[in-house]
Amino acid sequence: MRQVQSSVAKAKFAELLDEVERGETIVITRRGEPIARIEPEAEARRKRVEEAFRRIDEIRKQNLPVTLEELLEWKNEGRM
């Protein structure tokens, strides 16, 4: 969550909306006090999360299972 002064928000409103569209929540402040919050619409956020999980499942199906031992070995090799 990012905080932005109201004067900056006024000048950069379109840019802030782009950030919100990408999932960021913006808190607008006046004299350091929060006065408003701009956040992604809940349904749009839910759809993005569902899509991300769908992609993760696709990637997992394309790759062979990995054992714990393999993960630890990769970690020790600096690959993770």
Image (cartoon, rainbow, N blue to C red):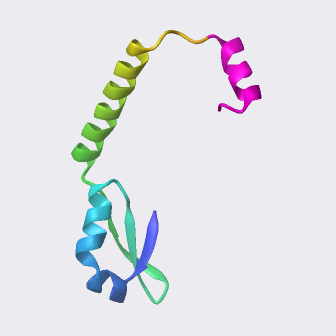
Residue at image point 25% right, 67% down: 17
The residue lying toward the viewer, choosing from 70 and 2, is: 70
Q: Which residues are magenta?
A: 67-80
Q: Position of residue 42 (x, y in %)?
A: 27, 48
Asked if residue 64 lies left or right of residue 11, the reply is: right
From the viewer's perspective, tell me whether residue 66 is left or right of residue 51. right
Q: Residue 70, image x and y in percent? A: 67, 14
Q: In the displayed image of the protein, which residue is found farthest to the right?
A: 76
33 over 24 or under it: above or below = below
Q: Which residue appears at 38% of the width and 61% of the height? A: 25
Quadrant containing the C terminus in the rendered view = top right
Q: Residue 32's spot in the image, x, y percent?
A: 49, 84
Q: Nearer the viewer, residue 72 or 20?
A: 72
| 25, above or below 12, in the image | above
User: For residue 24: magenta?
Assistant: no
Residue at 63% in and 10% down: 67
Give the side of residue 43 with respect to residue 77, left or right: left
Whole-percent x, y for residue 34 in the image: 43, 77
**Above or below, comparing residue 68 to residue 45 in the picture:** above
Image label count: 0
Q: Residue 18's image quarter?
A: bottom left
Instruction: Answer with the quarter of the image where residue 49 lies.
Output: top left
Identify which residue is drawn at 45% across, 73% down: 3
Magenta-colored segment: predominant secondary structure: helix
Report which quarter residue 16 is drawn in: bottom left
